[in-house]
Image: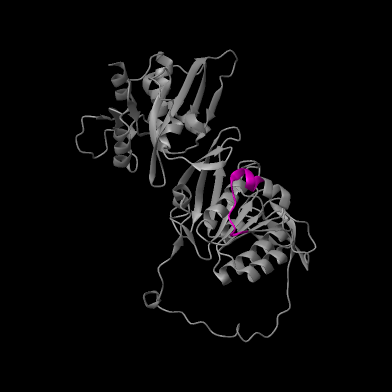
């Protein structure tokens, strides 16, 4: 075995350590690892030449999916579980990853699908107690508590289940390797063996991964490149609502989200997501409504703002659920175009319901909420603001605008503010705005 240095961000390998990765330019990401080498033998199969073929001549079968009967989960993974699909699910400690995987075993078990649940972190007694609380009682769930990757691979080959769950990749190891569980070498080689077994037998595999303090899956970035699907389980630890998000999916679209509520009986899918993000009260000062798109779904969200005089020399700029730089830009646009003096005011922005979004369509809703807070007047009842704000104050159209408007009208909102540059048919419920000066005038009227 040879010692190499491995970049945890991009996967670059080198024999010498340096403070900066030569490939991606990240600092302090080169970690010492052990390179696994093997003897090169004569392999007749390896000597077979593989010739390229025209892509139009290739034969293929339609991808068959196994649905879990839980629409929120099926939506995120592209409509169902595909044979041989390898998925990596990450999330903060205590967010509910193990609970979700145990319930996934139950969902599959009710369809007579055999699940092998492999745990390297908890004992049989702990998992049995949780399964009793969650009502997981299917006879098709088999439990294996071990930290040995080889034992897991052997169990997969022997039992040939319909689904395999490994919780977690950081807790298992290969005894032949001289490194600790959770190290780069162990994570990479263990994941490679599990992936090879799943692909060979055509068995779906779900791997649970820890996350770093930055919120990304711990371990080498190459781990995310190896799998077919990367899921993130998000949400505040003290908030009962959780969001399952796909950031990579070879068998479906990305950026779809599924909404779940954590109850004493486990995770329950949310039938009406818009109830989460709205207060359902009359218009309040500093509060506006926007419409965001997550994948193919649209949500009405509530933007809350508070602008008040600063008691300190440097005013505060606090953002929850949105980008900090976005607020700084919008405040500069307001000062430039509306002559609103904000340099001595503390400004707080919150996206209600615990959701996080970088959708540019929220720009207009943020501006409207700030104007409402500064003028100490509520916005018109039943109003939704959809539009991106440019640096010169112009209101720009956003993608899938018609779908956002339909969702707003369906929920009973009577006045929808959009960009005046959008090519929409005349609608009495839609108000077009060319810039934020027009917005200011419309709110004053």
Q: Quadrant of the N terminus?
A: bottom right
Q: Is residue 222 left or right of residue 277?
A: right
Residue lying at 60% horizontally and 69% vertically, measured from the top left: 160
The furthest residue to the left:
426
Q: Position of residue 116 (x, y in %)?
A: 62, 60
Q: Is residue 19 above or below residue 367?
A: below
Q: Is residue 192 above or below residue 345?
A: below
The furthest residue to the right:
178
Residue in the foreground of this view, choosing between 377 and 301: 301
Residue lying at 55% horizontally and 64% vertically, measured from the top left: 162
Q: Quadrant of the C terminus?
A: top left
Q: Position of residue 433 (x, y in %)?
A: 28, 29
Residue in the foreground of this view, choosing between 137 and 285: 137
Residue in the foreground of this view, choosing between 173 and 363: 173
The reply to whether the magenta stretch includes residue 98 is no
Q: Is residue 442 left or right of residue 7?
A: left
Residues shaded magenta: 130-141
Residue 164 quadrant: bottom right
Q: Is residue 373 visible?
A: yes
Q: Is residue 63 left or right of residue 17?
A: left
Q: Is residue 340 visible?
A: no
Q: Position of residue 407 (x, y in %)?
A: 32, 37
Residue 32 quadrant: bottom right
Render colour scheme: one colour
Residue in the foreground of this view, choosing between 324 and 155: 155
Number of disc labels: 0
């Amino acid at each position: 075995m040879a010692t190499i240095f491995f970049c945890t961000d991009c996967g670059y390998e080198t024999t010498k350590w340096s403070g900066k990765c030569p490939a991606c330019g990240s600092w302090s990401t080169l970690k010492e690892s052990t390179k696994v080498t093997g003897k090169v033998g004569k392999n007749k199969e390896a000597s077979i030449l593989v010739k390229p073929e025209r892509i139009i001549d290739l034969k293929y079968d339609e991808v068959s999916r196994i649905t879990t009967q839980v629409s929120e989960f099926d939506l995120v993974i592209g409509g169902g579980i595909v044979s041989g699909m390898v998925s990596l699910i990450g999330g903060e400690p205590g967010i509910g990853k193990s609970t979700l995987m145990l319930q996934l075993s139950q969902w599959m078990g009710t369809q007579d699908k055999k699940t092998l649940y492999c745990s390297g972190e908890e004992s049989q007694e702990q998992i049995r107690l949780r399964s009793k609380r969650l009502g997981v009682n299917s006879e098709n769930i088999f439990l294996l508590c071990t930290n040995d990757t080889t034992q897991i691979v052997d169990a997969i080959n022997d039992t040939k289940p319909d689904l395999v769950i490994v919780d977690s990749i950081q807790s298992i190891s290969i005894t032949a390797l001289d490194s600790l569980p959770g190290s780069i070498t162990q994570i990479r080689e263990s994941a490679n063996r599990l992936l090879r077994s799943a692909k060979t037998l055509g068995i779906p595999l779900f791997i649970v991964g820890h996350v770093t303090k930055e919120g990304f899956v711990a371990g080498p970035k190459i781990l995310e490149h190896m799998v077919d699907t990367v899921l993130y389980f998000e949400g505040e630890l003290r908030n009962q609502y959780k969001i399952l998000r796909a950031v990579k999916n070879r068998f479906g679209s990305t950026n779809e989200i599924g909404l779940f509520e954590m109850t004493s009986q486990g995770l329950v899918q949310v039938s009406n997501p818009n109830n989460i993000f709205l207060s359902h009260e009359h218009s309040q000062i500093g509060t506006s409504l926007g419409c965001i798109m997550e994948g193919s779904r649209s949500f009405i969200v509530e933007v809350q703002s508070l602008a008040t005089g600063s008691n300190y020399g440097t005013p505060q700029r606090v953002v929850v659920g949105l980008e900090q730089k976005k607020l700084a830009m919008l405040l500069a646009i307001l000062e430039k175009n509306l002559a609103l003096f904000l340099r001595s005011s503390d400004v707080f922005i919150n996206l209600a319901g615990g959701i996080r979004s970088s959708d540019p369509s929220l720009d207009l809703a943020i501006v409207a909420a700030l104007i409402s807070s500064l003028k100490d007047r509520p916005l018109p009842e039943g109003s939704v603001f959809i539009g991106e704000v440019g640096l010169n104050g112009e209101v720009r159209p956003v993608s899938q605008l018609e779908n956002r408007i339909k969702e707003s009208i369906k929920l009973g909102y009577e006045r929808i503010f959009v960009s005046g540059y959008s090519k929409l048919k005349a609608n009495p419920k839609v108000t077009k705005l060319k810039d934020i000066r027009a917005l200011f005038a419309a709110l004053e009227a």
